[in-house]
Image (cartoon, rainbow, N blue to C red):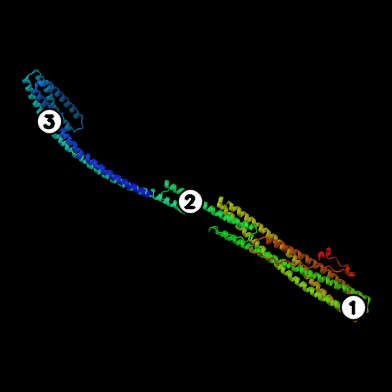
């Protein structure tokens, strides 16, 4: 049974018991009160006894015994003993009423009754009984007359005492009735007061005990159903129920703390899995589980940072592939340039041989001049083609420079992401510090994130430095190729001059013989330039190989990341085989080794 219902039931039982008790006590008091049934029964019994037996205070029986003793002298001893007994009873009752609580007027009247009775018993014992014992009938009759006079006086006082006693009894009955009435009124007032007190006690009990207990019970039921936001407010701040409510509040806050700790543990667990995936270079991992509202921005930031990093790595992989293809094209172009340079060297060697033949055979000058003219024309075409190749090489290296700049921008983006990740980890560490003991694990994770962000920033800086070095090498290669184009232009100009000279040789053999030494010198200069071109081609090949190696390293670095979709790296083109120039003699044999230290400075 609920406390409220039990309180109502208990109050009803108390009220019913009180009402029954009041009725029972009222009936009992009405029964035992003066004038009531019991009082009337006692009064009737007393009246009956008074009617049956003569009272000891009234000497009527003693007077009758004296008359009997006068009439029956033979039984004088019996009557004398009877009179003695009655005299004793009279004295005892006189002493009793003298010590009673009767009013003074009644006591005085009792004392008046005693004086004639004393005269009666004195006459009886001193004169009447001795006269009967002596057989003096005359003295006995005279004594009886005196006894009758004393009895008459006693009877008058008794009648007066009876009247006063009746008045006293009536007054006593009236007083008793008044007291009974007052008692009934007092009982009714007391019952009403008790009823009001019980009603007020019931209301106070419901307000200060039953209602707070109902509130406590409601809060406990809501907490049992999982509603940890339930709370009750009590009017009195200090009592046992308030202590119970505060204890329940402690349990509620503890449950909320445990639930919050479980939520934070779940968030830390999801973040740990995400960071472990990033540590294993799995950039395709995303946190799909929903976080609580206060942690949802953390999940969104993590997924956004991961997507940004994945996009950057994907673009870096594509750029690395482009750099690798560009370096392969540069190597191929450099190989073609080397082959053409070797061919040009061979043509110059043939030109030198022709010039020696012109020196030995003047007659063959015109024919040899025409042949030399044709060869020079071929050389001019080769030089022109070489210029075109050099122009393409310059354009390819410009693309490499542009790709290097884009990679530098990408590295800057990676560096910015690492910086933002570091700030995010720092903020997470601050929030974990505010969380206290429950945030220690999260602080460790935040420190690991900061360390990972720092390593990413360091790796980005290293890659940026490598790309800067490659950019410098490419710039140097561009400068060398530009210079190669200038040299080829000069070669074309020289070939044109040679063509003019051959025309002059054809016009005048003499002039050809005189200027043959100059032509030979020009061929030597062309040989030197050709050797220089070969050295520059070798340097271009070395730079292309270095750029290809750097591109391969970058490709291997980004291939370690899982971005969710594989980026297909372009296959590098194989460089053509290196052609070694044919051995030459004469002035051409004096050309420097392309690997000599003198060419390194060039």
Of tags 1 and 3, the one toward the viewer is: 1
To which quarter of the image does residue 279 belong?
bottom right
Q: Which mark is residue 132?
A: none
- Reading the image, the residue beneath label 2 is 252
- Reading the image, the residue beneath label 1 is 368
Q: Position of residue 314 (x, y in %)?
A: 66, 64
Residue under the point 19% across and 37% down: 41
Mark 1 vs 2, N-terminal side: 2
Q: Position of residue 483 (x, y in %)?
A: 79, 70
Mark 2 vs 3, N-terminal side: 3
- The answer to whether the residues at label 2 and label 3 have Cβ atoms under 8 Å apart is no
Q: Is residue 512 above or below residue 564?
A: below
Q: Kindly report the distance in space between the C-alpha atoms of the residues bearing marks 1 and 2.
A: 113 Å
User: In the displayed image of the protein, which residue is found farthest to the bottom?
Assistant: 507
Q: Is residue 334 visible?
A: yes
Q: Secondary structure at mark 1?
A: helix
To which quarter of the image does residue 456 belong?
bottom right
Q: Kindly report the distance in space between the C-alpha atoms of the residues bearing marks 2 and 3.
A: 94 Å
Q: Secondary structure at mark 3?
A: helix
Q: Is residue 173 above or below residue 287?
A: above
- Reading the image, the residue beneath label 3 is 157
Taking depth in this image into account, of 157 and 552 the one nearest to the observer is 552
To which quarter of the image does residue 578 belong?
bottom right
- The answer to whether the residues at label 1 and label 3 have Cβ atoms under 8 Å apart is no
Mark 1, residues whose alpha carbon is within 10 Å: few (<14), some, or many (≥20)? many
Mark 2, residues whose alpha carbon is within 10 Å: few (<14), some, or many (≥20)? many
User: In the displayed image of the protein, which residue is found farthest to the left?
Assistant: 138
Left or right, 452 with respect to 471, comes to left
Mark 1 vs 3, N-terminal side: 3
């Amino acid at each position: 049974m609920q406390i409220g219902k039990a309180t109502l039931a208990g109050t009803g039982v108390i009220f019913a018991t009180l009402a029954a008790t009041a009725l029972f006590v009222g009936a009992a008091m009405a029964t035992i009160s003066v004038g009531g049934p019991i009082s009337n029964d006692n009064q009737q019994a007393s009246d009956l006894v008074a009617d049956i037996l003569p009272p000891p205070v009234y000497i009527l029986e003693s007077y009758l015994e004296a008359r009997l003793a006068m009439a029956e002298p033979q039984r004088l001893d019996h009557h004398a003993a009877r009179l003695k007994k009655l005299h004793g009873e009279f004295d005892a009752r006189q002493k009793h009423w003298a010590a009673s609580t009767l009013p003074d007027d009644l006591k005085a009247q009792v004392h008046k009754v005693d004086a004639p009775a004393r005269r009666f018993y004195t006459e009886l014992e001193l004169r009447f009984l001795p006269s009967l014992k002596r057989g003096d009938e005359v003295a006995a009759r005279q004594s009886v007359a005196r006894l009758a006079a004393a009895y008459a006086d006693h009877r008058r006082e008794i009648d007066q005492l009876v009247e006063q006693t009746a008045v006293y009894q009536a007054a006593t009955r009236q007083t008793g009735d008044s007291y009974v009435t007052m008692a009934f009124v007092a009982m009714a007032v007391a019952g009403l007061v008790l009823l009001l007190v019980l009603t007020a006690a019931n209301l106070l009990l419901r307000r200060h005990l039953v209602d707070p207990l109902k509130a406590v019970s409601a809060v406990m039921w809501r907490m049992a159903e999982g509603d940890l936001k339930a709370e009750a407010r009590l009017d009195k701040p200090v009592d046992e129920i308030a202590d119970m409510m505060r204890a329940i509040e402690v349990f509620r806050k503890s449950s909320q703390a445990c639930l919050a700790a479980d939520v934070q543990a779940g968030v830390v667990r999801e973040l740990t899995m995400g960071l472990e995936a990033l540590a294993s270079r799995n950039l395709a991992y995303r946190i799909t589980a929903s976080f609580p509202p206060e942690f949802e921005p953390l999940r969104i930031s993590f997924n956004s940072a991961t997507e940004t990093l994945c996009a950057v790595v994907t673009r870096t992989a594509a750029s690395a592939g482009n750099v690798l293809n560009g370096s392969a094209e540069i190597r191929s172009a450099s190989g073609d340039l080397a082959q053409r340079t070797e061919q040009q060297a061979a043509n110059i060697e043939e030109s030198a041989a022709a010039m020696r033949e012109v020196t030995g055979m003047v007659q063959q000058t015109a024919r040899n001049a025409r042949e030399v003219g044709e060869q020079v024309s071929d050389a001019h075409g080769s030089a022109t083609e070489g210029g075109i190749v050099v122009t393409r090489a310059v354009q390819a290296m410009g693309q490499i420079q542009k790709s290097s700049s884009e990679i530098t921008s990408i590295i800057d983006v990676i560096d910015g992401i690492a910086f933002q990740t570091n700030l995010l980890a720092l903020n997470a560490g601050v929030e974990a510090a505010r969380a206290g003991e429950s945030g220690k694990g999260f602080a460790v994770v935040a420190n690991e994130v900061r360390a990972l962000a720092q390593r990413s920033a360091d790796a980005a800086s290293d890659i940026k430095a490598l790309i800067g070095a490659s950019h410098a090498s490419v710039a140097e290669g561009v400068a060398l190729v530009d210079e190669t184009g200038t040299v080829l232009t000069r070669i074309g100009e020289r070939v044109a001059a040679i063509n003019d000279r051959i025309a002059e040789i054809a016009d005048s053999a003499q002039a050809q013989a005189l200027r043959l030494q100059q032509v030979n010198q020009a061929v030597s200069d062309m040989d030197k330039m050709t050797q220089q071109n070969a050295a520059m081609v070798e340097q271009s090949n070395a730079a292309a190989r270095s750029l290809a190696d750097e591109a391969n390293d970058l490709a291997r670095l980004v291939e370690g990341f899982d971005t969710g979709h594989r980026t297909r790296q372009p296959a590098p083109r194989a460089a053509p085989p290196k052609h070694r120039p044919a051995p030459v003699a004469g002035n051409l044999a004096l050309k420097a080794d392309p690997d000599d230290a003198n060419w390194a400075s060039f």
